Each structure stands twice: as structure tokens, then as C-alpha cells.
Amino acid sequence: MQPDASFWQGRRVFVTGHAGFKGTWLCAWLTELGAEVVGFGHAPRFTPSLVELAGFANGPVAIEGDVRDRNALVSALGAARPEIVFHLAGRPIVLDAYHDPLATFETNLMGTVHLLEAIRVTPGVRAVVIVTSDKCYREPHQACRENDPLGGDEPYAASKACAEIVVHAWRNTYLPPRAGIGIGTARAGNVIGGGDWSAHRLVPDLVRAYASGRTPVLRRPGAIRPWQHVLDALAGYLRLARALHADPMRFAGAWNFGPEPGGEWTVAEIAAAVSRRLGAGPWQTEPHPSVLEAPLQRLSIERTKKRLGWRPLLSTAEAVTWTVDGYKELLETGRATWLRDQIRRYGERLGAREPRPFSAPADFDPEVRHAATASG
């Protein structure tokens, strides 16, 4: 299950949202594997950026742009000439989407359409991983499987469900697997890891409160989410890209990435574990949360484990430990060399596992069919 460095060495890779939290970790890992990475998106929101702090000398070539600008995407992809594309750009915060739904749909939905249209006119693209969300499911209270109905009761979830629908339509109509291009969507759970400073996310909010001596406020302490470390999710994305490149007919479609059963902790349990590791005190509860959010979200990863050969490496408790240790070093030293160290340590642990081959059977239908695609 270890990413194959011989495959990635010298491979041209295009990453949208490269300067975001997850994009930074992905670009760092790809450069460690020897890929030639071009990033597209906004400049880092925090100065100095996480990549600068981590000391990666061979970071991605960065093209500043906006996925809402189709012409900019066409130009950037044409210049990069990638074989593999990772689409991570988006507006990822539920609360931001609630207050600005128009920008959310412009980015998460139309940004995805623009990327797909740019790929149509860019020769040489072989594999595309489009990152959506576990929140794209209409009924998130069950352990959602890839063929469950899509929907969304708030703008962020709806925008991600819409993105899934347009990917399916473009893959079916314009970019079919039989033409030699594999397009997959990755539906990951709640991802945590050191260096995320986004507002209105649980762990960054807890760390900021700890660093400033404030008491953190939790919106929904009892909400249950499928937590996972960023490296577990990224290992899945890399695995998916490799499979799409090798056999687009069998692996194009949607894939869930989340924890093993039992990894779905409550917000309060995550907060308690983070606080213990930081040596911080208690929190307060927001009395009347203004945003509608599902109280329970679960993912089934059985299909991904069986057919893609991926499974998470870190337990939820380990994910919290790795995350907080990164933040502590960042706060204490102002450096992020731990990011590179964690990538290498994670890779070594992956390499020690028994390899799991791709195992899609000959009669496997990769297209996920949904009984319904909207709530209401």
C-alpha cells in the first residue's frame, strides 16, 4: 500500500488548491516521491506558509489563479501538461457556506465544471482525482456507501453533492474511461493534521484558544464524525490516482475514505483528547448554534478496502496525537520540519504492511448509481 516512488518519480502532476491545508500536505508528499508538481490556486493564506516552514526546497511550481476562471485553468493545464490531476480547490467550511452560498456554489460546483472543461482540451491527462466530501450524502446518519443517494440540507453539503453529479455527467458524456482517462471522486471524512489554521474547524479553533489563553467554544459537542489523519486520506488519493492511471475502466467512480468502524468520535471526545495532549482546560458549549449540521455522519469504507486495497493506518487516537504534536512544535519553535518527518514515518509504517493489490473483478461496474440525487 506504500505509494510507489518509481511510479511518481518524474510524473507531471497538477494540484488545484495546492496552498490549502490538505493541498500543502499532498504537494509535500508528492515532491518527496519525486513528482514534478504544479499547483494552481490562491496564494497561501498564512505567512509564512506551511511549506516554507517545513523547509521543502523542491516545492511545487505555483500558478496563482481561481478555479472560477475557466480560461485561467485552461492556460495553466496547457502549460503544465500533467498526466495526473488532483482537484482540491474549494470552499471547505460549512459556516462560510451558510453565510455565502453563492461563492460556495461558484467555487465548489462551477469550479469543478471549469476544471473538467479544461481537462477536455488538455491532451495527455490520464487520471483525475476530484475531492468532494462525506457530506455529499442525503442520509448521513447511516454508514453511507458510494451508491447511496446524494443530497444536502445546507449549502456546503449541497454544493458537494452537485459536484459529484457533474463529475458523473462529464465522465459519462465527454471524458469516458474507454477513452483512456480515469476520473474518480474521493469522499473523505473529517480530516485533521498539524498546520491547519482554518477558522470554524474544531482542532484549529481548540489550538488557537489554547495558544491565546481563551476558553474554546464548541458548536455541537455531541455530533459524531468520521475523523481521520490527513495522511490517511492522502494515501487513499494517491492510491486512487495510481489505480485510475493503470485501469480507468475498472476504477473510475466514487470512493469513500474514512476511519475503521469505531473511529467515529464525538466532537467532545476529540476536544477532550486534544486538550489532554495540549495540557489545556475545559471548553464551553455554544447555546444556540445557528448552522444546520447533521448530528451523525458515518462512512462505509468496505468497497475501498476490498477493491482499491486501501485502509487507514492511524487510529483516531493516533491521528489526534500526530496532529497535536505537530501543532505543539509549530507553536514552540515556529518550524514545521515535523511535517516532512511525519510523511516519512507514515511511509515507513505503510511499507511495513503487507501489500494489498488492486482487486476490482472483471465484472465490476465502476460507475456508482444513485437512487436519488437531491434532498427534499
Image (spheres, grey):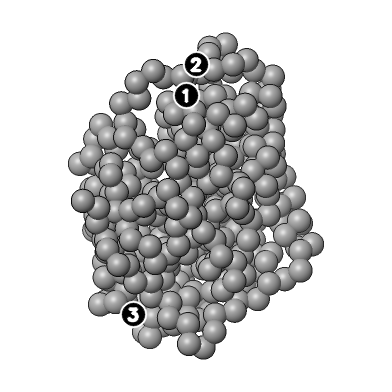
User: Label 2 near label 1: C-beta < 8 Å?
Assistant: yes
Residue 79 located left or right of residue 56: left
| Residue furthest top in the image | 213
Judge the density around disc 2: few (<14), some (14-19), many (≥20) Cα neighbours within 10 Å: few
Q: Which residue is mark 3?
A: 176
| Residue furthest bottom in the image | 362
Residue 352 located left or right of residue 180: right
Which of the 4 image quadrants contains residue 366? bottom left
What is the secondary structure assignment of the residue under circle 1?
Answer: strand
User: Label 3 near label 1: C-beta < 8 Å?
Assistant: no
What is the secondary structure assignment of the residue under circle 3?
Answer: loop
The label number, if any, that marks residue 284 in the structure image: 2
Residue 15 image offset from top left, x and y in percent = 45, 56
The answer to whether residue 177 shows anywhere in this view is yes
Which of the 4 image quadrants contains residue 211? top right
Q: Nearer the viewer, residue 215 or 220?
A: 220
What is the secondary structure assignment of the residue under circle 2?
Answer: strand
* Alpha carbon distance from label 1 to label 2: 6 Å
Does residue 215 lie above or below 152 as drawn? above
Q: Residue at x 53, y 13 (%)?
A: 215
The numbered mark, 3 or 2, whose residue comes first in the sequence reads 3
Residue 374 image offset from top left, x and y in percent = 24, 56
The answer to whether residue 11 shows anywhere in this view is no
Q: Nearer the viewer, mark 3 or mark 2?
A: 2
